[in-house]
Image (cartoon, rainbow, N blue to C red):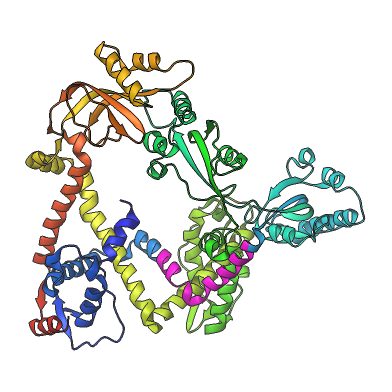
Amino acid sequence: MNKYSILFLLLVMVPVIVLGQDKKEVLLTIDDSPVYVSEFKRVYKKNLELVQDESQKSVEGYLDLFVDYKLKSAEAYAQNLNETNTFKREFRKYQEQLSRNYIFEDKVTEDLAREAYERGKEEINAAHILVRVGYDAVPQDTLKAYTKIKEIREKAVNGESFEELVKQYSEEPGAKERAGKLGYFSVFSMVYPFETEAYNTKEGEISDIVRTQFGYHIIKVLDRKMREPKISVSHIMISDNVGTRTFDPKERINEVYAMLQQGKSFEDLAKQYSDDKNSAIKGGKLSPFTKGDLKSKAFEDEAYKLEKPGDVSKPIESEFGWHIIRLEKKHNNPTFEDEKKRLETRVKEGSRSKIVTIAVNKKIKDKYGFSQKNNYAPFFNDFVSEDVLNRRWKYDTLSPAQDKTLFTIGKKDVKYSDFAEYISERQRRIRLQKNKYAVLNDMYDEFETLALKDYFREVLESENEDYAAVISEYRDGLLIFDLMEKNIWNKAKTDSVGLQKYYADNKKEYKWNERFEAEIISATNNENAEKAIKLFKKGKTGEEIKTQLNQDGKVNVIFTSGTFEKGDRELPENFVPKKGISKIYQQNDSFIVVDVKKSIPAGIKPLEDARGNVLSDYQNYLEKKWIESLHDKYNVTINKKALNKVKEEL
């Protein structure tokens, strides 16, 4: 289970704190700190359906869970976990996410997502000319580059060969060989300013000059066409990257393909043999996709070659293994609502995010008022040494005379010292660069954005009850996660002596079921299965049977061997383990015979084989003991009168 799954479970028990609670209704105190009736009632109503233990669904039963939660929360603050950099970093992420709706960030994002949706209906084939100049270039170099690209554009507009102009002037690596051609691209394939200029240019025409982080460009749009719609396919995959195999993956996929050609069900073969477990249980079906979605050109190209639903490819190899692909459906183009979530994610991650930031910053400044008191550049260009480029600048303090106000947002003054501390911390994560002024400029833009959003959130938590309630959930949930990780989970993982002792005291709980060494023949029909039984009885091995029954390129049987436990995927669902040759079992359109060579009795699992279950149980044991210690450490007093009132109401 990953961190966020565990955090979700913790949040099930997180109370929602509401502003303006009735402080006269104290339900309990923990070392004289009050916990209010309104808090408990809200949590109880919110989480009751999630509680699985019937004994904990009563008010008194749930109160036990609630008290344990409050003790963990108190202990997290006692251990100063709210002061750790890890907590602050994680909590900032949640603040950023939760406040988006309140600062209209999602509205700006939605508008850009809608624009991307419209553009994404088309693919553009274009060529470009680049004159390189970075955003950190001195003004003279910037002007020189702009003058050059302007002259080139005039030549292109006046009819000179764009291809020849590329070869003569473009500073893009490899431009001469490719003649500046980019091929077909669509939305999100290029940085946003370049993409925008390309989509705003008609077919056959030359774009205006556009600047990106690479320099100045002009673009010639060679062709525009509608994008291909999504398709749905099913596949059978034999991976060539799952550890030791008792068979050759290429040989196995060809065997499966032969069985398919012989009339076996695609779905049954996928369930029986495909290594893509997620799709195998659905008969091999994948979610709809278009080119570029699967990150496998070989797979996508083969899938798009299929013309009619039901068409099946020959075995092909991709980065993930060997596949047989069947076309299920060619889809109509999706609506914006269908694509909205995916597009908004792309907007937040790509070059469009800067546009969102600029719009949001303006809204905050307009709402609360913003005043630039001093320009950072004159002071910090001298104060910060070149060592910042190597992430080694040392910051101590600023004198009162030096520590001027940089800007004011609302009622808060942001000082030079705040920016200096940010530079000191931020330099550890910058890419090595050569221009100190450009680095400081980027850092200032980031710092101003963070300061604006931080102020907005500070005010929002005191102004908006809904936001305050939700952010409290996340704050305490993160703290309790860190508390559990420090005191329980990590301890269990590193306490090898304790784990050994716990296993020794409870080893009877960790047992193998009966296992057996066996060879399995999966045949295409009952006749071939009966032949396999006869050959097993003559002492033939599974490999020899496979060779004898698969003749002239026709696959009649598939062979698997190993050590199995009842319930393993390779075995029939109703298989009865018994030494010797089994009866014929029919499953997934296959006829299966199992030759059990050796039975391995049920018994205690060694610690190494049971480690996952033992570790989980040991963690639960440690948590139980630790919760008992918290009850001893803190004084919990229940207000019986208030509790009885709650029981009457709920």
Residue 619 in magenta stretch: no
Assign the C terminus to one quadrant of the image. Answer: bottom left
Q: Is residue 467 above or below residue 533?
A: below
Q: x and y percent of residue 414 in the render?
A: 50, 76
Residue 109 in magenta stretch: yes
Q: Residue furthest front?
A: 527
Residue under the point 40% across and 41% down: 280
Q: x and y percent of residue 230 in the render?
A: 58, 51
| Pick the front one: 124 or 83 | 124
Q: Main secondary structure of the magenta part?
A: helix
| Pick the front one: 431 or 233 | 233
Report whether 470 appears left or right of 144: left
| Pick the front one: 444 or 453 | 453
The image quarter in which residue 357 lies:
bottom right
Residue under the point 26% across and 11% down: 539
Q: Which residue range is magenta in the image?
A: 92-117
Q: x and y percent of residue 322 in the render?
A: 49, 32
Q: Do we see residue 562 in this rendering?
A: yes
Q: x and y percent of residue 516 in the render?
A: 20, 26
Q: Residue furthest top?
A: 538
Report whether 373 appears left or right of 617: right
